[in-house]
Amino acid sequence: MEDFIQNNKLTILGKLTAGLLHEIRNPLTAIKLNLEYIKMFEEDLSSEVVESVTSSLAAFERINFIITDVLDFTKKVNDSKKDVSLNSITDRSLEILSVTLTKRRIKVDKNLNAALPYISFNENKLLQIFLNLINNAIEASTDNSVINIYSDKYRNGTDKIIWAVEDQGCGIKPEDKQKILEGFYTSKMQGNGIGLSICKSLLDEIGAELKFESEYGKGSRFYILFPLS
């Protein structure tokens, strides 16, 4: 009975959260439009004001990214699939995150197999997964460090493709490893803890596996095994 009550609470909370976030998004959009309007006159503004407006717009994008994550987590979307390139989506993800990478002076070492076949998946979902995993690697890394991203055929006697992102950051504590893929668990000072759960849920739709290896204090490697079929 206690489990039933708790599950019912979470169901109600999910519906309330989705409605609340939709309401929050409307005034946030108005704030963004006003900030963009102010930025149109940046030549007449002081550098301090321009910097403040720019940082506020960046903060909006971060909030909007979190809202999108939560909303996607609360609903199941039946989007169409098509043949997509893992390498192309990787490049798109890095382009989106390029400002953060430059600001943190983090270098990305790519080793993408150009001969890999395409996979059948929803393009936007795959982009969301890669953005989450790469962004997590960035947040775990120190400035002036290196992130490795690679894709290849999985050399373990199975007909799969591996895509991986590896950082040299803080790593995951041994006691946290069992919880890291669970929803609403995070060890970060900021974050909602659902990013990896969303990735796992989306990958389950096509029978792909999300795995990780980590050594506390030395870094982590998150990787996906995509079935070729």
Image (tube, helix red, strand yellow):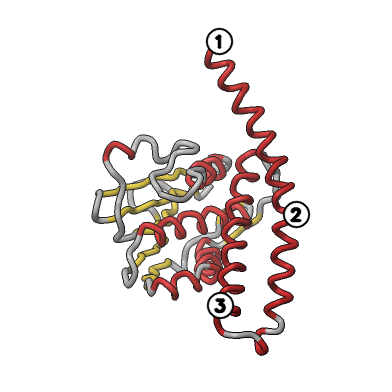
Residue 95 position in % (x across, y down) = 53, 71
Identify the mark nearer the N-term, 2 or 1.
1
Residue topped by disc 1 = 1
Residue 41 vs residue 157, the one in the foreground: 41
Q: Nearer the viewer, mark 2 or mark 1?
A: 2
Element assignment for label 2: helix
**Left or right: where 8 falls relative to 226:** right
Q: Residue at x 33, y 60 (%)?
A: 167
Q: Eyeballing the image, is 116 above or below 205?
A: below
Residue at the spot 60% in from the left edge and 78% down from the top edge: 49
Residue at the disc numbered 2: 26
Q: Position of residue 162 (x, y in %)?
A: 41, 54
* In the displayed structure image, the side of residue 131 where residue 80 appears, left or right: right
At x 75%, y 62%, the residue is 30
* Residue extending farthest bottom: 43
* Amino acid at circle 3: Glu
Q: Give the residue pinned by disc 3.
A: 51
The vertical placement of 103 against 196, above or below, is below
Q: CA distance from mark 2 to mark 1?
A: 39 Å
- Amino acid at circle 1: Met
Q: Residues within 10 Å of mark 3 (few under 14, many from 20)?
A: some
